[in-house]
């Protein structure tokens, strides 16, 4: 593997990280807004000052970076849409199922963690869309393309 290929992989990783970070921020803001409104409706205090979302955000950005690199290698120059969707589903399901498993084990509730699992899929869908756009713009070259 040449240095040019490595640079292209890092570029793909950065694009994936940016997309995942932006999608994580959007879904977190929506999730917090909806949960505070729901808490107000049922008369429960939703005030929470923990910063666990920072760790979750860092994990989402790192996951997006790794997805970007892997996605570049997976698709290569193959136009197969199933291959592209399969990469998104693989990353999304692994991250999402881990969140569901953790939530089920810790709290015996499924719905909040199922929402997090859906958000995981959205992270990688957004990363795929931005990466595909970057490939079309020739900002990033698929693996093996000179």
Image (spheres, grey):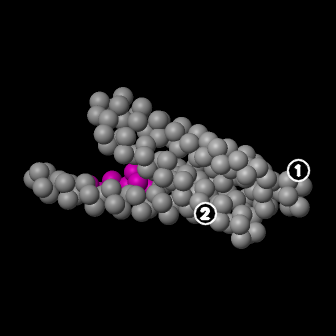
Q: Is residue 110 magenta?
A: no
Q: Which residue is mark 2?
A: 130
SS for dot 1:
loop
State the image coordinates of residue 20 (x, y, percent, origin top left). 54, 57
SS for dot 2:
helix
Residue 87 shows in the view: no
State the image coordinates of residue 53 (x, y, percent, origin top left). 41, 54
Q: Is residue 90 left or right of residue 76?
A: left
Residue depicted at 47% across the width and 35% down the height: 97
Q: Eyeballing the image, is 106 above or below 146?
A: above
Residue depicted at 38% across the width and 58% down the height: 28
Q: Eyeballing the image, is 141 above or below 120?
A: below
Q: CA distance from mark 2 to mark 1?
A: 25 Å
**Circle 1: is it few (<14), some (14-19), or many (20+) Cα within 10 Å?**
few
**Circle 2: is it few (<14), some (14-19), or many (20+) Cα within 10 Å?**
some
Total marks shown come to: 2
The quadrant where residue 138 appears: bottom right
Q: Is residue 8 left or right of residue 38?
A: right
Q: Is residue 78 left or right of residue 130?
A: right
Q: Which residue is mark 1?
A: 1
Q: Is residue 70 left or right of residue 144?
A: left
Residue 99 shows in the view: yes
Residue depicted at 20% across the width and 59% down the height: 37
State the image coordinates of residue 7 (x, y, percent, origin top left). 79, 61
Q: Which of these two is toward me, 15 or 129?
A: 129
Q: Earlier in the sequence, mark 2 or mark 1?
A: 1
State the image coordinates of residue 55 (x, y, percent, origin top left). 46, 51
Q: Which mark is residue 34?
A: none
> In the image, which residues are magenta?
48-55
Instruction: Identify the image quadrant of the C terminus.
Output: bottom right
């Amino acid at each position: 593997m040449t240095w040019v290929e490595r640079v292209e992989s890092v570029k793909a990783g950065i694009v994936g990280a940016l997309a995942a970070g932006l999608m994580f921020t959007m879904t977190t803001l929506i999730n917090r807004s909806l949960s505070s409104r729901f808490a107000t409706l049922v008369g429960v205090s939703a005030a929470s000052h923990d910063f666990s979302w920072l760790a979750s955000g860092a994990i989402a950005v790192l996951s997006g970076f790794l997805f970007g690199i892997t996605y570049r290698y997976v698709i290569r120059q193959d136009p197969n849409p199933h291959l592209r969707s399969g990469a998104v589903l693989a990353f999304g399901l692994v991250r999402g199922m881990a969140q569901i498993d953790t939530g089920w084990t810790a709290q015996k509730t499924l719905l909040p963690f199922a929402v997090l699992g859906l958000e995981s899929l959205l992270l990688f869908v957004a990363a795929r869309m931005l990466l595909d756009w970057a490939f079309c713009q020739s900002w990033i070259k698929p693996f093996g393309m000179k």
